[in-house]
C-alpha cells in the first residue's frame, strides 16, 4: 500500500532529529539544541519563567517600551510595517503597535501554526483596523515577505524583543543581523532587545529561580526525549544547573548527571559519569558598545540606544 507522503516526510524529519540528538549526546561535552526545550509543556513553562521575580527581562523590557513610546513612534514613522521574527505570543508587540501613530501592517513570523493563530487573534482583537499578515516559518531562515498589494507603507521595521538574540553565538547573530537587514530593505529599521552583562548572582538567580520553574523547563527536555524519541532518561537522576561563564559573557544551562549511568536514545546508548553534564542552552549577555559594534559589522547603523535605570537591559534601534 502506498504511504501517505506526509507521514513519510514526518518520519524523515523525526529520523534527522534523532540523528542530531544522538550526535549531540555523543560529543565530549554532551550538548542538545535549545530548540528541544520548546514543546507544548516547555513553551508553557517558559511563559511561567517570564512571571518569576528573578527573571527580570520581560518586566524591564516592557517598562522600557512603555517609557520610550514616543521615540518608538518617531523611529518607525507613519505607515510602517512591523515584522516580528519568532513572534510567539506577541506580548510586547502590542506595546509597540500601541505606541505607533498609524502602523500599516503587522507581519508575525512563527514556526508553530497554533502559536501564530493565537498571536493573530490577540493582535486583531487589540488592533481591529490593522492589516495582519502571518507567516509560518523558522525565524532564523530568510522568508519571502507577503505581497502587500495596494497598501500604502513607508518603512519596514523588524522587532526582536526578549533578548531572543542572546540564545545564538555572536557569529550567528552577525549572520542573522545581515539577513534581517536584507529583509528590512532600504530605509528599513530594527528594534532589538539585548540583555546586558551584570553581576553573576543576578544572572544565575534569573536562570535558576527559587520556585524551580527554570529547572522544570530544563528537565522537561529529557521528558520530551523519553516521549518522542523512546529515550529512558531517569529525570530524578539529573538536575538543572545555570552557571555564568564570565569569559564568554553567557549564562549556560546544563543538566547534571547525579550518578554514573547509562541512557538509551533510539537504540544507542550513552554513558554518563557522576557530575557529567548535557549543555542545553546559552544566553549571551552584552556590553552596550559590543552589541552596537556587532550590529555595525552586519551593516546596521545606530539610531537610539536605551538602557534601564538599573543597567539590566538594552534596546537598540538600528537603521538599515
Ligand atoms: C528565550 N530566551 C531569550 C530566554 C533567555 O533568557 O535566554 C530563554 C530562557 N532560558 C531560561 N530562561 C529563559
Image: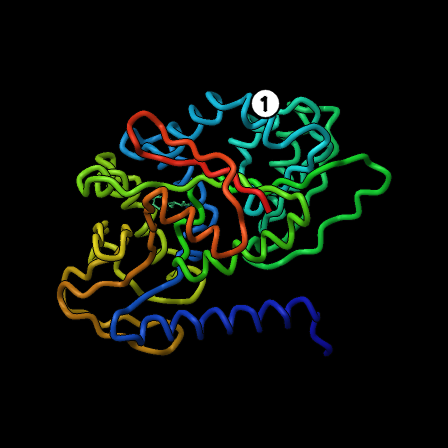
Relative to residue 234, is residue 158 drawn left or right? right
Relative to residue 43, is residue 51 drawn left or right? left
- Tell me the crowding category of disc 1: few under 14, some 14 to 19, or many 20 or more residues within 10 angstroms, Cα based: many
Camera-nearest residue between 54 and 304: 304
Relative to residue 55, is residue 106 drawn left or right? right
User: Quick check: is the Cβ at mark 1 less than 8 Å away from ligand 1?
Assistant: no
Camera-nearest residue between 250 and 16: 250
Where residue 18 sits in the image (x, y, percent)? 45, 71
Q: Is residue 223 above or below residue 310?
A: below
- What residue is rendered at 32% in x and 25% in y? 309
- What residue is rendered at 32% in x and 47% in y? 285
Where residue 256 sits in the image (x, y, percent)? 20, 59
Camera-nearest residue between 17 and 143: 143
Where residue 164 sits in the image (x, y, percent)? 44, 46
Q: Which image quarter is the N terminus in?
A: bottom right
Where residue 98 sits in the image (x, y, percent)? 60, 23
Which residue lies under the disc numbered 1?
99
Amino acid at each position: 500500500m502506498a504511504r501517505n507522503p506526509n507521514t513519510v516526510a514526518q518520519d524523515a524529519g523525526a529520523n534527522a532529529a534523532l540523528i542530531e540528538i544522538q550526535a549531540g549526546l555523543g560529543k565530549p561535552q554532551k550538548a542538545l539544541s535549545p530548540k528541544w526545550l520548546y514543546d507544548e509543556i516547555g513553551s508553557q513553562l517558559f511563559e511561567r519563567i517570564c512571571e518569576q521575580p528573578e527573571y527580570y527581562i520581560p518586566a524591564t523590557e516592557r517598562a522600557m517600551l512603555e517609557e520610550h513610546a514616543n521615540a518608538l513612534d518617531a523611529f518607525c514613522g507613519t505607515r510602517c510595517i512591523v515584522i516580528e521574527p519568532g513572534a510567539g505570543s506577541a506580548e510586547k508587540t502590542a506595546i509597540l503597535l500601541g505606541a505607533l501613530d498609524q502602523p500599516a501592517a503587522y507581519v508575525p513570523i512563527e514556526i508553530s501554526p497554533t502559536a501564530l493563530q493565537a498571536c493573530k487573534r490577540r493582535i486583531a482583537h487589540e488592533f481591529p483596523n490593522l492589516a495582519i499578515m502571518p507567516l509560518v516559518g523558522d525565524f532564523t531562515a530568510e522568508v519571502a515577505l507577503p505581497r502587500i498589494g495596494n497598501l500604502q507603507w513607508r518603512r519596514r521595521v523588524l522587532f526582536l524583543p526578549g533578548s531572543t538574540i542572546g540564545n545564538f553565538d555572536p557569529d550567528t547573530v552577525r549572520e542573522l543581523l545581515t539577513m534581517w537587514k536584507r529583509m528590512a530593505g532600504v530605509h528599513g529599521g530594527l528594534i532589538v532587545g539585548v540583555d546586558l552583562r551584570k553581576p553573576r548572582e543576578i544572572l544565575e538567580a534569573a536562570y535558576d529561580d527559587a520556585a524551580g520553574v527554570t529547572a522544570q523547563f530544563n528537565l522537561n527536555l529529557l521528558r520530551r526525549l523519553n516521549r518522542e524519541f523512546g529515550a529512558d532518561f531517569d529525570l530524578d537522576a539529573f538536575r538543572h544547573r545555570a552557571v555564568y561563564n564570565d569569559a564568554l559573557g553567557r549564562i549556560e544551562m546544563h543538566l547534571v548527571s547525579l550518578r554514573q549511568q547509562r541512557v538509551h536514545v533510539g537504540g544507542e546508548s550513552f554513558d554518563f559519569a557522576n557530575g557529567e553534564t548535557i549543555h542545553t542552552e546559552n544566553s549571551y549577555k552584552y556590553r552596550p558598545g559590543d552589541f552596537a559594534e556587532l550590529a555595525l559589522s552586519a551593516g546596521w547603523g545606530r539610531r537610539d540606544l536605551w538602557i534601564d535605570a538599573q543597567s539590566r537591559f538594552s534596546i537598540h534601534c538600528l537603521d538599515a
